[in-house]
Image (tube, grey):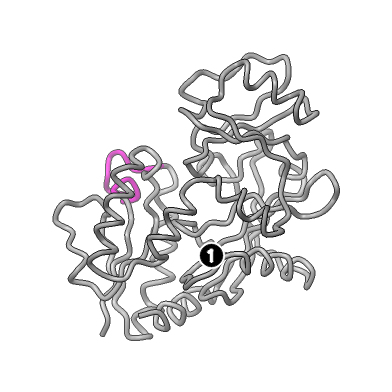
Amino acid sequence: MKHVAFLSAACMLKDNPEARKDYWEYDLEISALAPACREAGIELVTRIWDDPDFDASHYDAAVIGTCWDYMQKPEAFEAALETIAGQTRLLNPFEIFRWNQRKTYLKDLAARGAPMIPTLWRDRADAATIDAAFEALGSDDIVVKPVLGGGAWRQARIRRGEALPSPENLPIAECMIQPFLPAVSQEGEYAFLFFGREFSHCARKLPAAGDYRVQSEYGGREEIHHPTDEELALANSVLACVEGDLLYARIDMLRGLDGQLALIELELIEPYLYPQQGPDMGAAFARALKALI
């Protein structure tokens, strides 16, 4: 029996008084993954990534899982993963993590032909920067996101003429600015899940009424989406832009103003895997993991 550490965060444990609102997503995910891995001869053991007693050398591999507090302490997270990668096989690999943790990786994917949403890259999200972004993007409705972050953390939708959100609700430093795309409220986002580069399933993510954020902690919900051949080919073309061994990948896409799907993110670090929309995802994950260890 192989032993693999599934890295998570203390804030994802339901008994923690400071648990996140979406802690239950860890429960759903590990409940789908652990039994399938056990059938494949792999014991998947949850370990907290910043637990000082965690020694990854006792495991055959370590999988970056629901480490959903890393954006609050990115330097510590990177240092921990570098240490873990020196003790065992890290999945996805450390070099993939370093590239994918900053959303500037989207520049690389754009250069390789991936379909993109128009994006401005700026050093700060202050009033002058945001005012100029309305003009540069030709839009009265924009979304500002931190370059390093996830789960809509410190992300804001801003309409021209409205007061800016408070500083704690804006990116701390570097940011990316995009036009707001109405399709997110009308059609939702699409999350294509791959394990070992093989397509597993697709979730359509829909925000709560009156919101645009699709994450469950803001009232978002998901449903199964059966992609067309064209949609799947597009997702595969994005994945083909990245080299190397990948245990998992999640490709998030949204319909742009031109009516075509465009890339929001390529999640290669700690994506939620949407187990409820992929009834066979546990077995697919286990097969991919077994092939890599």
Between 41 and 173, the one nearer to me in the picture: 173
Q: Is residue 258 magenta?
A: no
Residue 200, x across and y down, in percent = 59, 73
Q: How many marks?
A: 1
Residue 17, x across and y down, in percent = 28, 39
The residue at 60%/36% (across/down) is 176
The part of the chain drawn in magenta is 10-20
Image quarter of the C terminus: bottom left
Left-right relation of 19 to 217: left
Between 44 and 251, the one nearer to me in the picture: 251
- Which residue position holds label 1? 249
The residue at 41%/71% (across/down) is 33
Give the quarter of the image for residue 228.
Answer: bottom right
Q: Amino acid at mark 1?
A: Ala
Residue 99, x across and y down, in percent = 47, 54
Please identify the dominant SS of the magenta region: loop
Give the quarter of the image for residue 126.
Answer: top right
Rendered position, 80 above or below 177: below
The residue at 36%/73% (across/down) is 34
Between 142 and 191, the one nearer to me in the picture: 142
Secondary structure state at the residue bearing disc 1? strand
Left-right relation of 210 to 16: right
Rendered position, 210 above or below 31: above
Q: Is residue 18 magenta?
A: yes
Rendered position, 265 above or below 95: above
Mark 1 Cα within 10 Å, few/some/many (few <14, many 20+)?
many
Image quarter of the N terminus: bottom left
Give the quarter of the image for residue 35.
Answer: bottom left
Name the residue furthest right: 258
Residue 230, x across and y down, in percent = 79, 69
The residue at 58%/66% (across/down) is 193
